[in-house]
Amino acid sequence: MAKRLDRVNELLRREISAVIARDFEWHGVLVTISDVDVTQDLKEAKVFVSVLGGSASGILEQLEKKRGFIQSKVSKRVVLRNTPVLSFRADSSASRGVDVVNLLDQVAQLPTAPPVEEQD
């Protein structure tokens, strides 16, 4: 059953991403669907949205307002007994990754101790 859920999660992620890329415009903001987590009964799906370059709350509000539109587009492309009810959640893993890279760059700039020479 886990393999089936993984396939459904990936299929929904791709289709929701396609709908958002095709039917929505985000000016100066990068919006991606990073993950989808469907319940075992396939009735609900948590959609994790990564937002770079803007506020995630405004984007999530727009997606929640257009949830029915997105679900209808997805249901035409994905054949399931029930189309899951989508709920959009913020995924901050991309921004946390950028923060970690910036911290690593800062650490690389710090002075280091001189190498210790080994004596025989």
Image (cartoon, rainbow, N blue to C red):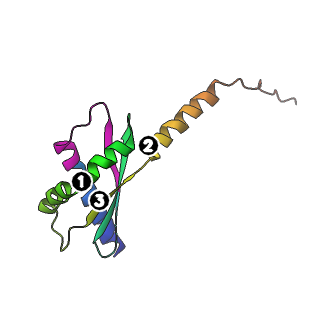
Residue type at mark 3 is Glu
- For discs 1 and 3, the disc positioned in front in the rendered view: 1
Judge the density around disc 1: few (<14), some (14-19), many (≥20) Cα neighbours within 10 Å. many
Mark 3 to mark 2: distance in Å? 19 Å
In this figure, what is the number of numbered marks? 3
**Mark sitting earlier along the chain (1/3):** 3
Q: Where in the figure is residue 25, as x and y percent of width and height?
A: 22, 37
At x 71%, y 23%, the residue is: 111
* Apparent side of residue 59 relative to residue 70 in the rendered image (left or right): right
Question: In the displayed structure, would residue 60 be above or below residue 83?
Answer: above
Q: Quadrant of the N terminus?
A: bottom left
Residue type at mark 2 is Ala
Residue type at mark 1 is Ile
* Apparent side of residue 107 relative to residue 62 in the rendered image (left or right): right
Q: Where in the figure is residue 48, as x and y percent of width and height?
A: 36, 54
| Secondary element at image label 3 | helix
**Residue 46: within the magenta?**
no
Q: Where in the figure is residue 20, as x and y percent of width and height?
A: 22, 46
Query: Which one is nearer the viewer's eye here, 41 or 102?
Result: 41
| Secondary element at image label 1 | helix
At x 52%, y 37%, the residue is: 99
Mark 2 to mark 1: distance in Å? 19 Å
Q: Which residue is mark 3?
A: 10
Q: Which residue is mark 1?
A: 16
> Which segment is the magenta one?
19-35
* Apparent side of residue 11 relative to residue 92 in the rendered image (left or right): left
Judge the density around disc 2: few (<14), some (14-19), many (≥20) Cα neighbours within 10 Å. some
Query: Which one is nearer the viewer's eye here, 115 or 61?
Result: 61
Give the number of the disc on residue 94: 2
Mark 1 to mark 3: distance in Å? 10 Å
Query: Which one is nearer the viewer's eye here, 113 or 37?
Result: 37
**Mark sitting earlier along the chain (2/1):** 1
